[in-house]
Amino acid sequence: MTLPRLHAVTDDRVLALPDFLDRARAMALGPAVALHVRTQRDGAFALKITDQLVALAAESGTQVIVNDRADVAALAGAAGVHLPANGMPVHAAREAAPTPWWVGQSTHTAMSALASTADWAFLGPIWPTGSHPDHPALGADALRGAGPRVVAIGGLTPVRAREAVQAGAIGIAAISALWDAPDPGAAAHAFLLSFEL
């Protein structure tokens, strides 16, 4: 399995976009990209969306990750699950899969990112973000001591992504900078270029 570098994270606003699947298809650029299903709605809705994305992404090898719901991820044949900071233990999520899969985890301090046994640890917000206005930005320096599996999230742009990668991030996660872009495919490509230092 190829570790995804760019994580296109959804929320219920994104999932309600009338051209959501078209935007997802544009970002399905291969295994370096992970499309995340993150919703507050019920499991049936999460499974429907995940099934659609798994089918859409299969040809390119783009990976689909389900946030919070290991059961939905397993049923849909997703590439993995991403856990909230206070979610199920990482080892339990690994055991929930019929075959080896990715397990990611959200964290909010460099220390918790370093302690995580997940395949990647989202750390953020690194820069101010509208999705978490009550969380102070940690700054790119927080990435330097966060270990080898940290993924930067929060206020990312392609320019900031390059700074995050230079500070040690193995991946980048974004919501609005990808899903709200006039050309989501071009935006995803611009983010991926951040890893070609």
Image: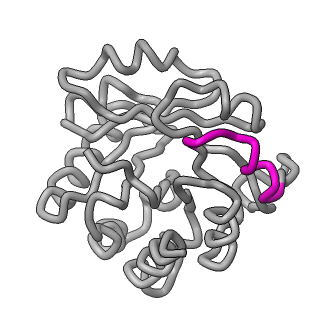
**Vertical order, 81 against 36 (above or below):** above
Q: Quarter-wise, where is residue 107 in the image?
A: top right
Q: Per the image, is 141 magenta?
A: yes
Query: x, y (%) of residue 164?
Result: 67, 63
Q: Which residues are drawn in magenta?
A: 139-149
Task: Identify the image's colour scheme: rainbow, by chain, secondary structure or one colour.
Answer: one colour
| Residue closest to the far left | 59
Residue at position x 51%, y 30% in the image: 83
Query: x, y (%) of residue 186?
Result: 42, 84
Rendered-image quadrant of the N terminus? top left
Rendered-image quadrant of the C terminus? bottom right
Q: Quarter-wise, where is residue 16 in the image?
A: bottom left
Residue at position x 28%, y 45% in the image: 50
Query: x, y (%) of residue 108?
Result: 74, 37
Query: Could you tell whether 52 is left or right of 80 in the image?
Result: left
Residue situated in front as seen by the camera: 140 or 49: 140
Residue at position x 74%, y 61% in the image: 130
Q: Quarter-wise, where is residue 159 in the image?
A: bottom right
Query: Could you tell whether 17 is left or right of 54 in the image?
Result: right
